[in-house]
Image (cartoon, rainbow, N blue to C red):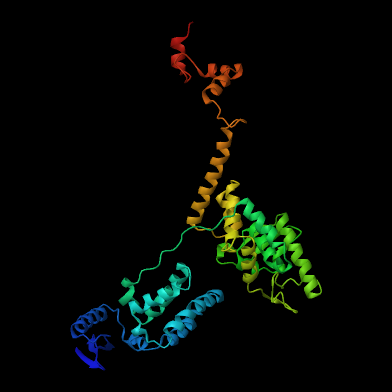
Amino acid sequence: MALYKRKNTWWTDFSVNGQRFRESLGTTDWREAQAKEKELISQASQGKLAAGSQQLGRSAFSQVADQYVADRLLHLASSSIQTEKERLKPLKAHFGATCLNRISADSVRQYVAQRKATNLSNRTINMEVACLARILRRAKRWHLIADEIEPLPERHDIGRVLTPEQKARLLRTALSKPEWQIAQLAMTLALNTTMRACEIRGLRWRDIDMIERVMTVQKSKTKAGLRLIPLNNQALRAILQLRERAKALLGGSPLSDWYVFPHAEGATKPDPTRPMSSWRTAWRRLTREAGLSGLRFHDLRHHAITELAESSTSEQTIMSIAGHVSARMLAHYSHVRLEAKRTALAALSKDPQGEGHVTIDGTKEDFDDPGEMQVIENMVDVTGLEPATPCLQSRCSPN
């Protein structure tokens, strides 16, 4: 065990169980270096500091990040890999050539502050930091700073739900411009099938049976998302519009393997063998025009499920239509359904003039019915409301 200096920075060189460890302590203070050395020896004794991670810790962040993505290819779907790459872009731009063992709690907090200054949501920043943590764990570095990094508070609301007036205004606005037609048709499907955006983009013509009026979701976020959804009139009308649009763009009836929403749909020659990447630009302009800026396309799914819950649809039916619904979401929609029932029953307690019924008087009037009185008399015997046993009947008989 030895402490030594390199360019005024203290380093440690020690061995545990035959393995040699050499690492910078990142300080110029001798007492602080001693404390850090003891901590490293303790971690090495507990198996938290691997000899192989020493070399990885001296590697640049961007280099380890690329290797991290390559290793994840075996475990994640292509869409999840793309998401990981998106999260790594700002991390690589910030840390870049920084060695992993030089990433401290202060540098992570600085990164969080810079990302927050760009008005990003707390959830997005937390997901990026989580990706950073997975990379640092490979070099046995994350546990050194984990206690000092607190995640930003996140919103835990289920999703935004439109009022009837907002929904009508959104539909009117979507129909006002031809360039918003794709966003409008996708919106119609989401509101009438509870489908996610990724499910709508992955829809092929072979998945639609217009005779039986059903749609099969073949690819979804989870296995529970694979399901059969009946088409109501509005959803079927949107599908027919998409079919006519495909005929006009592609010069004939679409093939079964073609996507309902083709790639580069607005181009001169769209590619129906690839799915559309997004309608984000049209959706943002549409929602701003409708006075609903910030409305996510995914909120349409929550709105549709809320309408199902308010119609007293059972949880089993909701899950059959919507696919995967978490326990937290089910609890939320159960509350929605209860509130809808409470509102409906509250309306029964008001007369046409807006005054409540007199419950006691109403109950007395009900008992004035001779038929109901006869039923009650039949229930009453000499012992009270409960009919007497045969033994009591024989003792109390006037004969």
Q: 229 above or below 66? A: above
Q: Nearer the viewer, residue 228 or 55?
A: 55
Q: Nearer the viewer, residue 46 or 191?
A: 191
Q: Which residue is found at the position 44% from the left and 72% from the top? A: 116
Residue 375 in sight from this viewpoint = no
- The image shows residue 186 at horizontal and vertical percentages of 67, 64
In the picture provided, is 167 more to the left or to the right than 121? right
Number of numbered discs overlaid on the protein picture = 0
- The image shows residue 272 at horizontal and vertical percentages of 72, 75
In the picture provided, is 22 more to the left or to the right than 195? left
- The image shows residue 151 at horizontal and vertical percentages of 39, 68
Residue 19 image-quadrant placement: bottom left
In the rendered image, which quarter contains the N terminus? bottom left
In the picture provided, is 142 more to the left or to the right than 45? right
Residue 302 image-quadrant placement: bottom right
Q: Residue furthest bottom?
A: 7
Q: 348 above or below 235? A: above
Q: Which residue is found at the position 58% from the left and 17% from the top? A: 368
Q: Nearer the viewer, residue 378 or 230?
A: 230
Residue 24 in sight from this viewpoint = yes
- The image shows residue 351 at horizontal and vertical percentages of 60, 30
